[in-house]
């Protein structure tokens, strides 16, 4: 991965000197000015010259906002863990489709920091969880405006059978280049690209987002999983997806998360890994280690393994989704989650944890007003290392 080695003033310390960024409108003039003043920059002395401009992301043409977001996440993860929630603004227990509302906010007075969404059923008006794509775009823009982070998974249909993501019939080899359904796959990617291209801020710049395709591949339940394709086919699928979105659609605002299910060792975790040039964040989904107090040792072990891999590869790492359905233990957040994520007052280094969605009375993963775990969640949030949106902004404003 190519990195700059010269130094630039602190106020523009993460700008990548790439002509391709000129297309990003407002930032184009800044970069053009940098080209003209490069000799002066290279010769400057003192504190302003001590900050290096490094390419933090796998995409050599990553947009400035994407680089800034990743750098911010890197800084925050040194001391804090952000809390996320899937479909947090779309619905909750007893409500649906409010302007800007979430169950977590109704419990503790602050909003999640990370907002999970899904691109499943990208050809329709509503996604796999009946969330209107138009609303998803509107909410994502507001999340970004407020300083939050959007992340997207994709429960894509089986393109061979027309079945769901859980139809594990062979599919991957048929949608790779040369396969019978490759053109159909590219059309799906085109639709996903059109969606991402609509995520723009008030200056028409692409909003940086975390993209988590092809998750839980070491499990056998999805058609891109271990029972339905080989590791090499999976790697080809990932690389084609990334290259197509980057090169054909110029979506250099995407930050890619490689996300397995639970794993036993580094070899298992990296079996399907497509390479450092295609991944920015190392993640895994944890519904098993975080199940109860007797299983959290597994979460701790996995985070230790992930920490070692992340350190070697210079990547962030995260629990990209997880929880326990209906939260049967009223002290689960403070007595199960917190000890798994922290030790002796310090975090175990993850950037964030995303609790899954509050879909219905028998399928929810975050507290809501009146639930037995609500008070415990407030205690969980009192820990100085766990942060929601408003507190995050306060932390960043002090930096």
Image: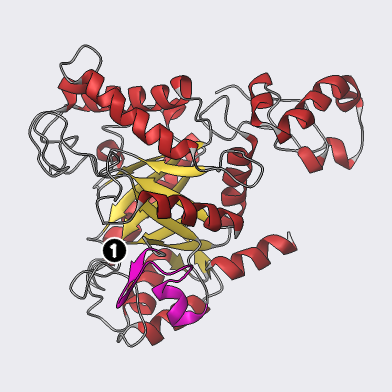
* Magenta-drawn stretch contains 356: no
Residue at the spot of label 1:
297
- Against 120, residue 111 (above or below) is below
Q: In the picture provided, is 117 more to the left or to the right than 314?
A: left
- Against 114, residue 34 (above or below) is above
Q: Residues within 10 Å of mark 1 (few under 14, many from 20)?
A: some
- Against 188, residue 165 (above or below) is below
> Residue 308 at what x, y percent from top left?
43, 44
Question: Which coloring applies here?
Answer: secondary structure
Residue under the image location 26 percent in, 32 percent down:
271
> Residue 51 at what x, y percent from top left?
77, 38
| Viewport quadrant of the C terminus | bottom right
Magenta residue span? 90-109
* Magenta-drawn stretch contains 92: yes
Residue under the image location 65 percent in, 25 percent down:
23
Residue 351 in view here: no
SS of the residue under disc 1: helix
The picture quadrant where one finds residue 396 is bottom right
> Residue 298 at what x, y percent from top left?
27, 59
> Residue 339 at what x, y percent from top left?
39, 71
């Amino acid at each position: 991965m190519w990195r700059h080695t010269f130094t630039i003033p602190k106020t523009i310390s993460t700008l990548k000197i790439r002509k391709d960024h000129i297309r990003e409108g407002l930032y184009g003039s800044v970069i053009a000015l940098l080209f003209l003043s490069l000799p002066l920059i290279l010769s400057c002395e003192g504190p302003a010259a001590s900050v290096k401009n490094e390419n933090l992301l796998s995409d050599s043409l990553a947009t400035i906002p994407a680089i800034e977001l990743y750098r911010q996440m890197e800084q925050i993860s040194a001391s804090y863990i952000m809390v996320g929630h899937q479909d947090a603004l779309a619905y909750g227990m007893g409500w649906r489709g409010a302007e800007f509302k979430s169950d977590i906010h109704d419990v503790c007075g602050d909003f999640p920091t990370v907002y999970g969404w899904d691109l499943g059923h990208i050809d329709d008006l509503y996604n796999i969880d009946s969330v209107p794509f138009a609303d998803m775009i509107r909410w994502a823009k507001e999340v970004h405006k407020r300083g939050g982070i959007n992340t997207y998974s994709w429960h894509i249909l089986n393109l061979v059978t027309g079945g769901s993501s859980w139809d594990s019939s062979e599919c991957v080899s048929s949608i790779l280049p040369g396969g019978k359904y490759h053109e159909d796959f590219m059309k799906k990617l085109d639709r996903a690209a059109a969606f991402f291209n609509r995520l723009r801020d008030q200056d028409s710049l692409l909003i940086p987002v975390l993209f988590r395709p092809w998750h839980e591949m070491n499990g056998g339940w999805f058609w891109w999983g271990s029972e339905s394709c080989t590791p090499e086919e999976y790697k080809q699928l990932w690389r084609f997806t990334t290259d197509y979105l980057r090169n054909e659609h110029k979506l250099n605002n995407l930050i890619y998360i490689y996300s397995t299910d639970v794993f036993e060792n580094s070899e298992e975790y990296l079996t399907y890994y497509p390479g450092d040039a295609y991944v920015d964040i190392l993640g895994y989904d944890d519904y098993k280690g975080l199940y109860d107090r007797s299983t959290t040792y597994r979460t701790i072990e996995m985070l230790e393994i992930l920490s070692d891999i992340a350190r070697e590869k210079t990547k962030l790492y995260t629990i990209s989704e997880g929880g326990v359905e209906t939260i049967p233990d009223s002290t689960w957040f403070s007595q199960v989650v917190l000890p798994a994520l922290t030790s002796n007052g310090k975090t175990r280094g993850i950037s964030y944890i995303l609790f899954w969605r509050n879909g219905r009375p028998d399928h929810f993963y975050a507290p809501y007003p009146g639930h037995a775990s609500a008070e415990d969640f407030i205690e969980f949030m009192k820990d100085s290392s766990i942060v929601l949106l408003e507190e995050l902004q306060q932390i960043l404003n002090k930096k």
